[in-house]
Amino acid sequence: MQILNTDVAVIGGGAAGCYAALNLHRMDLKTIVICKGLIGKSGASIFAGNLVLSGRSLGNSETHARDTAEFLIKYHNQFLIDQEWARQCGQWLEKFYYPELEEAGLYLRRDNDGNVVTSPGKIRSVAANMQGNSGVPFMDLRRKQIIKAGIPRLEETVVTCLLCRLDGSVGGVFCLNYITGEYVVVLARAVVLATGYSDRLHTRSTGTREMSGDGIAMAWRVGASLVNLEMQWWHTNDIAYPPSWQRVQVYPNPMLGSEKSARMVNTEGEEFFNQQQDDPLAYGPYTVQLKALAKQVHAGKARYEGGYFAGFDNCDPREVEAYTTYGKSFRQLGLRFPEDLIETAVTAHYRQGGVDVDTRTMRSSVPGLYVAGGLGGHSNGLIGLATYDGKVVADGIASDLPPQQTGALPEQQMEDERRRLEGLLVARADGVPPAKVKDIIRAMMWEKAGVEKDAASLRSALDDIANFRLNLLPRMSMKRTAKSTNYEWLDAIDAVNMIDACELIIHSSLERKESRGPFMRRDFPLQDNDKWLVANVMKRTENGFRFEQRPYELPLFKPGFATANNLEVAW
């Protein structure tokens, strides 16, 4: 077993984790980055399609700046956001983020005259270098920066638990290098969880295999409070078939350099969403699209898993091809572009909720444990916002760290975790492969805690969770029990985290008794701003958990109504 010591352990190699590590390194704080996949090559960040412009950056006007703030607060977070944090984030993005990216060599697509190409509308975005593909060059840049800075990194290494000092504060992590099969313990003065969204908890998901709710499960086990876990976002227009292409979206969102965008058609050939008619200001396409689809599902003209279509047959193909990657998918599937439409389906995308943090420092409720990026419950999505978290968490740690020392080696915790992991490394004659267990969990979540749910489906889901713990997890079995390069072992570790995270999400979904944006309850169809414009905080107790509702302050924007049918709310 390898024992390492550092000032800060950063768990996750996406936008938030990389930027936190780079800033901590600049502050001369010894930092190790631990990534379940490869830094800059896995997780949500690589799938960023474009970069939303903020403030007065890259030619934005004051009006654009205000519209972008409204988009972030109202349309992108359904008012479940610290508006002061949003204001500060926008100012940082404007003054530092884009200038720093261009200075570092990230190429933002330009036209023949040298002007940066943007999307039209009140909310504008840019691409690096093609719309639909911006996350890849962005994260390639971050990976190069981490390597050039000489920041130590542990890749293809999964953190399986957080280690606590005698006073209950977090002081390290227990890891498994699943390539070598070696255990690694990293003792740290502070730990940053930046494991991203818990996207891969449903049958259809945009998330990569690494995203199995690890951060939620590990934070909860050491007593961290959670918030708004029920607020799952969805992609409405990902390719339905083949299933392996489920994260490839046919965006009905504004395109770069064009006034046109894809359109959506139901099973009867009727157009039911067109950006230019139905959301011309381009404020919040994902939720607007989802609500439009829900109405078609209710009318029997579409299904969440398919039965409706999208495409660019209303567009000039030269405009689509100039700055986007969208045509490539059609041609690879043998379809004519742009004449043919393609069957699309819903996939789980961001989770707006996560670990509850102090947005001034990114501290969790457990001393020594910090959170940045998609795992935090304070904002939904966008690669720029996750990057800002990396800056804030580094500043917070730098101010907190001076009195904190590395704790003693927690030998009993380490031994308990080793035994737990090796208890999963077994072969049974009548066992169930871990990958199958994960599929069963995802299918249950899709059916009973998917786009639309109610108390009955959610309680049934909790019954399933109890049955999984009793009858499914104990039957997990592997074909080989060698420790090195054993991906079944990794799947088994994931399955345990998934069940823990899913149970917490289901309880939180039961607690929020309204519908809001992408969160849709059949038994509570109204958006209720009188009672539920609050943070739905889940706290550990000695015998379980309890919920608290914490109102949001509304200094910049307010909903303007008390209650309304959520499907009729424009955001």
Image (tube, grey):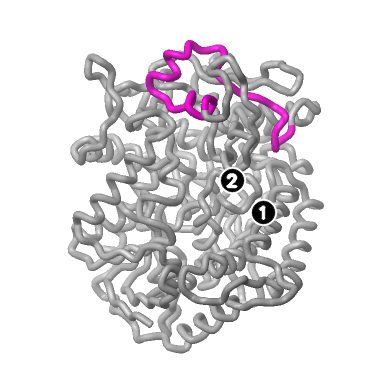
Which residue is drawn at the image coordinates 41% and 63% (left, top)? 156
- Report x, y in % for residue 529: 63, 39
Residue drawn at (61%, 64%), measured in percent from left and top?
495
- Residue 506 visible from this viewpoint: no
Tell me which amino acid carries mark 2.
Answer: Ser
Q: Which mark is residue 205?
A: 2
Whether residue 152 is situated above or below residue 44 in the rendered picture = below
Q: Is residue 458 magenta?
A: no
| CB contact under 8 Å: marks 1 and 2 | yes
**SS category of the residue bearing label 1:** helix
Residue 387 relative to residue 197: left or right: left
The spot of residue 51 in percent (x, y) is 37, 34
Q: Which residues are magenta?
A: 303-331
| Nearest to the observer: residue 416 or residue 518 | 416
| Residue 330 seen | yes
Please state the horizontal and vertical placement of residue 262, each as a whole percent of the image: 55, 20
As drawn, 150 above or below 86: below
Q: CA distance from mark 1 to mark 2?
A: 9 Å
The answer to which of 57 and 396 lies nearer the viewer is 57
Left or right of 522? Residue 486 is left
Crowding at mark 2 (Cα within 10 Å: few <14, some 14-19, many 20+): many
SS at mark 2 in the image: loop
Q: Which residue is mark 1?
A: 442
Place of residue 193 in the rendered image (x, y in percent of width and height, measured from the top left): 42, 62
Side (left or right) of 360 relative to 112:
right
**Residue toward you, 316 or 75:** 316
Q: Residue furthest bottom?
A: 412
Identify the mark at residue 367; answer none if there is no mark: none
Which quarter of the figure is the N terminus placed in? bottom left
Q: Quadrant of the C terminus?
A: top right
What amino acid is found at the position of numbered circle 1 in the picture? Arg
Residue drawn at the location 50% of the way across and 59% of the way down: 355
